[in-house]
Amino acid sequence: MISVLTAAISALIISLLGTPAVVRFFRRKGYGQEIREDGPASHATKRGTPTMGGTVILLATFVGYLVAHLIALRNPGRGPTASGLLVLGLMGSLGLVGFLDDFIKIRKQRSLGLTAIAKFGGQLVTGVGFALLCMQFKNHNTHLTPASTHLSFVRDYKAWSLGTIGFVVFAYLVITAMSNAVNLTDGLDGLASGSMVMVLASYVIIAFWQFGNACTTKATAGCYQARDPLDLALVAAAAMGACFGFLWWNASPAKIFMGDTGSLSLGGLLAGLAITTRTELLLVVIGGLFVIETLSVVIQVGFFKLTRKRVFNMAPIHHHFELAGWVENTVIVRFWIICGLAVAFGLGLFYAEFLSNGPLG
């Protein structure tokens, strides 16, 4: 537990204290956010606010994870694992895609960066590569790989095997969907970063609970088959601390935005954690806010193509409520409440499933 707290606190301190320096540097370089012309009029004042703050989140997460392992060196067998490094690699790779997108926006002074084909291409290479690597690196003792080909809600359903090709396709869809979902949610000051704190906190709990009830140490009914749950808890804790520290400066009125660098990387991180903890379908519940935001865009686009009419004032749905007259902070807080309820419900399902399989751990 000490290592989990170390990862979270280290990342929090780096993000909290390092973000102001990044804000000043980006201001000098003129790395300011471009605003959608069709967006709410109140957003015009945000033009020029430094973006690419996701670089701070990435750095703080990586350093927090490293510091936690340096502190734990005295414990043999507690070094970095394949699962943890793969999830961090996925986060970093999608962060690079997002960085290129942000940089093009800044250089060309427009609200659109990479083309859709280029962005999805980057997600394809990253997602497929992650999925293939997750089928390697068998543990010497348990012979478990970081991921499995079985469909999972709270644990693998042995009867629902996707096969290698099916798993790669499924993993790519999960990674692409979640990275884009967080990207869509990142439209108001602190909305995405505050929501990520809650969702990542749930994965700290899930991964640590799996570690305490792993089949390798406690082969009882309801035990878990995740390969490296403790290391995944460190990754989730470090990212949670990084988002918490960043939220201090990203909350309304935001001094810096995370940009696609942050949103794509954090969405990929969530997908990676879900795949390696065998909770892919549970992520739909825990990340309910991100799902709602994505569905609002799908519904808006689909309905408009069919009828030439709009369901919402604007999509994603947080802009619908802004245009309906809600103050931005009201939208943010109420969406945080929705996120918190989704996280609580998801954790409730996770624990209820554990209780249904056997006695308390």
Image: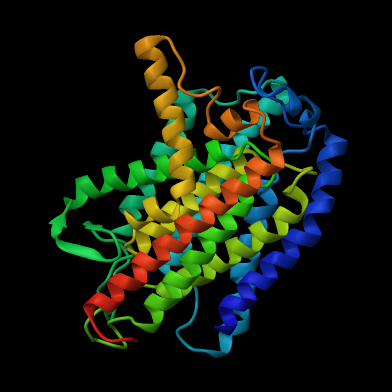
Q: Residue furthest front?
A: 325
Q: Residue furthest top?
A: 308
The residue located at (64%, 68%) in the rendering is 64
Is residue 205 rendered to the left or right of residue 12? left
Is residue 277 rendered to the left or right of residue 297? left
Quadrant location, the N terminus = bottom right
The location of residue 279, given as percent across then percent down, is 34, 60
Q: Colour scheme used in the picture?
A: rainbow
Vertical relation: 281 (above or below) 69: above
The residue located at (74%, 48%) in the rendering is 251
Vertical relation: 304 (above or below) 77: above
The residue located at (57%, 44%) in the rendering is 263
The location of residue 111, given as percent across then percent down, is 65, 23
Res. 225 in view: no
Q: Determine the image quadrant of residue 217.
A: bottom left
Res. 327 in view: yes
The location of residue 9, given as percent across then percent down, is 68, 72
Quadrant location, the C terminus = bottom left
Q: Nearer the viewer, residue 3 or 255?
A: 255
Is residue 297 rendered to the left or right of residue 161? right
Q: Nearer the viewer, residue 306 or 67?
A: 306
The location of residue 264, given as percent across then percent down, is 53, 43
Q: Nearer the viewer, residue 122 or 328?
A: 328
